Amino acid sequence: MPKVNTVTVWHAKIPTWGGDPHPRWDAENFTMVAIIEPAPEGEAVSLDHAYEMTNHIDKAWWENEGVTRVGPECRSTSVGDVIFHEGVPHRVASFGFDAIVKEVA
């Protein structure tokens, strides 16, 4: 079972690159690609850190310490993807992150 401060990263199956002005959480449209464990001291993983840790910078992101890739190799996290932080889904925006509605009405 993941630790309390664990963050999960979900990539859009059909990326919109943030083009949807009213994003909603619908698990059918996303695939979980990563689990990011907190530091051994128990520090929470920030949204910025989760984004950075799931981007190819100087190596494949799944080689980063504390990151567990779920599924096959995949792209870097980008605008329109979702990061679950403290149980709340946040869409990666052009600048920062937007909390989104958890379920489709």
Image: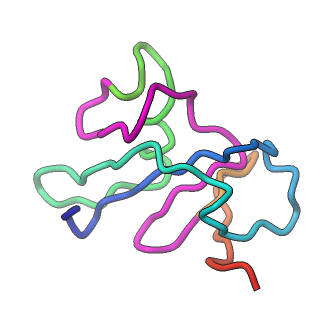
Q: Position of residue 6 (x, y in %)?
A: 30, 60
Establish if 54 lies above or below 103: above
The quadrant the C terminus occupies is bottom right
**Would residue 102 appear left or right of 15 to someone viewing this image?**
left
Establish if 24 lies above or below 50: below
Magenta span: 63-89
Residue sitting at x 64%, y 70%: 99
The quadrant the N terminus occupies is bottom left
**Would residue 9 appear left or right of 97 to someone viewing this image?**
left
Residue sitting at x 66%, y 68%: 26
Q: Position of residue 79 (x, y in %)?
A: 71, 44
Camera-nearest residue between 97 and 87: 87
Image quarter of residue 103: bottom right
Residue sitting at x 44%, y 65%: 85
Q: Is residue 82 magenta?
A: yes
Name the chief secondary structure element in magenta: loop
Q: Position of residue 23 (x, y in %)?
A: 77, 66
Q: How many marks?
A: 0
Camera-nearest residue between 44 and 71: 71
